[in-house]
Image: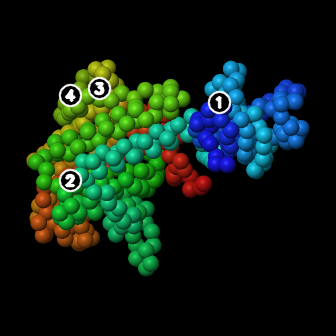
Amino acid sequence: MQRTYSSHVKVGNHVMVKGWIAKVRDLGGLKFFLLRDRTGTIQVTAKKGKVSDAIIKKFGELGREDCVSVEGKVTAAKQAPGGRELVPEKLEIVSKSETKLPIDVFGKIESGKDKRFDFRFLDIRDPKLQAIFRIKAVAINSIRDYFVKSGFIEVHTPVIQAAGAEGGATMFPVIYYNREAFLRQSPQLYKQMLMASGMDGVFEIGQAFRAEKFHTSRHVSEFLSVDFEQAWIESEEDIMNTLERMVAHSLREIAKDCKDELETLGRKVKVPELPLRRVTYDDMVKTLSKAGTPLEWGDDIEDAQERKMGEILAKKGIEWYFITKFPSKIKPFYIMLDGEVSRGLDLDYKGLEMASGGQREHRYDILKKVMKQKGLDPHKFEFYLEPFRYGMPPHGGIGFGVERMVEKILDLPDIKEAILFPRTPERLVP
């Protein structure tokens, strides 16, 4: 018989269900357990005289988190979760679980974060945590759907690279045969190279790496990045238009397809009206100064300043907003400069940066000049610079942290909660 998931079980049907035992109760002549699979739970009930003695005996061997397979008829039962229960005709213990669990799967006994991540495979059996990753899956699929329908081409660029998009000490070196290479910080350089290929619009959803010695709730060493690049743009405004439509589409799909998961987590998704608010760096300096959290013109925006700006705009009902017209000196070499300001942009959500990018510099001579000004050796970037010598159109793009979006949508305490097996300076396994 083909397996049926618990959420698809209907009264009157004869079914086979498979999963883990979430709870076992023995009331003498009445025994039951809750079987949990990835879609929910169903109660399996054995009443003396209604099932075989062999089934009754088998119930006595059951323990929490055992893997079982059950076949029987579904009947109505007001007292059971979902108003139905399965009366077993066949019961097989597929795999026993050790009786002392290292963590409480349902979180009634709170385990420390490190302990939970040590036993992540058990941790994720919690339906609330499974809801997080189903929402994340919809977020990723909806983003891909948006780009495909918008005519972008999905690409996959190298994770092992000869140089980083931003250079510096935040790169993981690897030995590539007898040469030094690095895990990518971003597919940035390759996306730009593809703009010279005539592909015009590309996107990539893949891993990126930052070797920062952080200890915060918003950073990890390996994260999932959504990147896109598009050519023949007029300005960074074209990039913001693409990005805000991507965000709105993803949020609509999450709200539509994840009703049960959002209810499980007690969260709602608010889809912003477009266009999103544009806040210039100058505006931010003035606003923060009035609020008593000064930002000196020309300085990078610190976390506290970013959060404060989010709080100020939240009082006006604004959750998503762009920050534009950054000082040229604080943006990477590939962002186009316009005097003292740049054509770079950030997208923030609830006071946390979700995306960074803007219009790129496509003029070969100016690009080399800016690289030198930023302390980079153009000779080390020859593979990247080569396409700019043979007709590079105006272009731009961004890198977007989809896990940060999930974190903020669900008000999670830590971005690591939105990652199956997070990597930090201290954590390499599991």
Indicate the quadrant where residue 389 lies.
Answer: bottom left
Specify the color scheme.
rainbow
Q: Residues within 10 Å of mark 4 (few under 14, many from 20)?
A: some
Tell me which amino acid carries mark 3. Answer: Ile
Tell me which amino acid carries mark 4. Answer: Lys
Q: Residue 318 carries which label?
A: 3
Are discs 1 and 4 less than 8 Å apart at CB? no
- Describe the element under mark 3 as helix, strand or loop: loop
Indicate the quadrant where residue 71 lies.
Answer: top right
- In the picture of the structure, the residue carrying the numbered disc 1 is 11
**Marks 2 and 1, Cα distance to the nearest angstrom?**
53 Å
Are discs 2 and 4 less than 8 Å apart at CB? no
Q: First in sequence: mark 2 or mark 1?
A: 1
Single out the mark in the foreground, 4 or 3.
3
Q: First in sequence: mark 3 or mark 1?
A: 1
Residue situated in front as seen by the camera: 144 or 324: 144
Tell me which amino acid carries mark 1. Answer: Val
- Describe the element under mark 1 as helix, strand or loop: loop
- In the picture of the structure, the residue carrying the numbered disc 2 is 230
- In the picture of the structure, the residue carrying the numbered disc 4 is 286
Q: Quadrant of the C terminus?
A: bottom right
**Marks 4 and 3, Cα distance to the nearest angstrom?**
18 Å
Location of residue 178 in the rendering, given as x and y in whole percent from the top left corner = 43, 79
- Describe the element under mark 2 as helix, strand or loop: strand
Which residue shows up at 30% across the image and 32% down it? 320
Location of residue 11 in the rendering, given as x and y in whole percent from the top left corner = 65, 30
Q: How crowded is mark 3: few (under 14 residues within 10 Å), some or many (20 or more)?
A: some
Q: First in sequence: mark 4 or mark 3?
A: 4
Location of residue 403 in the rendering, given as x and y in whole percent from the top left corner = 43, 43
Q: First in sequence: mark 3 or mark 2?
A: 2
